[in-house]
Image (cartoon, rainbow, N blue to C red):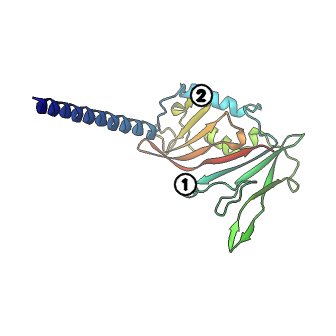
Amino acid sequence: MKTSILNLLALSLIVSFAASCGKKSSSGGGSSHSNSNYTNPNTSAFGEAAYNNLKAWQAGSTEASTVGTHLYFNKRSVSTFNKSMCQKNTVVVDCVDPTACFKHTSNGILKGTVTMNNSTFLGLTIKKYGDCDITTESTTFYTKIDNTELADAVLGTAKNLIKAQTQQAGSIYTVYYGAFAGATSPVSYAVINTSLPSILNPTEVGTVNNGYKSPSSKLFEFYSGY
């Protein structure tokens, strides 16, 4: 009798465990598919309404977020996603130089030239970000309209913009482009985050294949301060 009860308990535990594993596997698969698809499940606005919101932000002079006194960042291709950006106060042997840098002066924001403080140790190149040199730059101050990459992403110049596919999830917009004028299926996209300084946008660009996004480059790291 005691043996029969123990066998029943063991069988019950095995069935419960199998059911639990089945639920986890199903849930994980569904989540992965949703994140891969180009449709954002958290969309707060869609189509031309979302596009008009984005276009109004791009055309406006007000920044949603300021640069601060100093900003440097790295936009990189997928081939260098695994490398960190060289920092000012961190010594790294294998890091990626910042893509660009800006300084906020009393008159406005100036784009500078990235300078590095590299050294060698035991045959290795030790890389450190140095500064943002604005001494060789003109006195033309950055405005949102000066960001040609952002303007090209929002206006879709020569990219066959599909306004009806525009998605807005809070401050993050995704804009899609077709292979030809009048196309309704996207082949490429750009992501704009209006909560960040406009200098950092677009934060991601890439292609769309069978409804799935594949980034070709993205904003990987940025530092704003000192």
Is 56 placed above or below 104 here?
above
Which residue: 49% across, 33% down?
40
- Quick one: SS at disc 2? loop
Is 72 placed above or below 155 here?
below
Q: Residue 57: x and y, percent? A: 69, 30
Q: Say which label, 2 or 1, has the lower sequence index.
A: 1
Q: Which residue is mark 1?
A: 78
The amino acid at mark 1 is Val
Mark 2: give few (<14), some (14-19) or many (20+) Cα within 10 Å.
few
For the C terminus, the quadrant is: top right
Is 151 placed above or below 216 here?
above
Which residue: 36% across, 39% down?
29
* Residue at the farthest bottom position: 123
Q: Which residue is mark 2?
A: 170
For the N terminus, the quadrant is: top left
The amino acid at mark 2 is Gly
Q: Residue 39: x and y, percent? A: 47, 34
Which residue: 65% across, 32% down?
55
Q: Nearer the viewer, residue 160 or 212?
A: 212
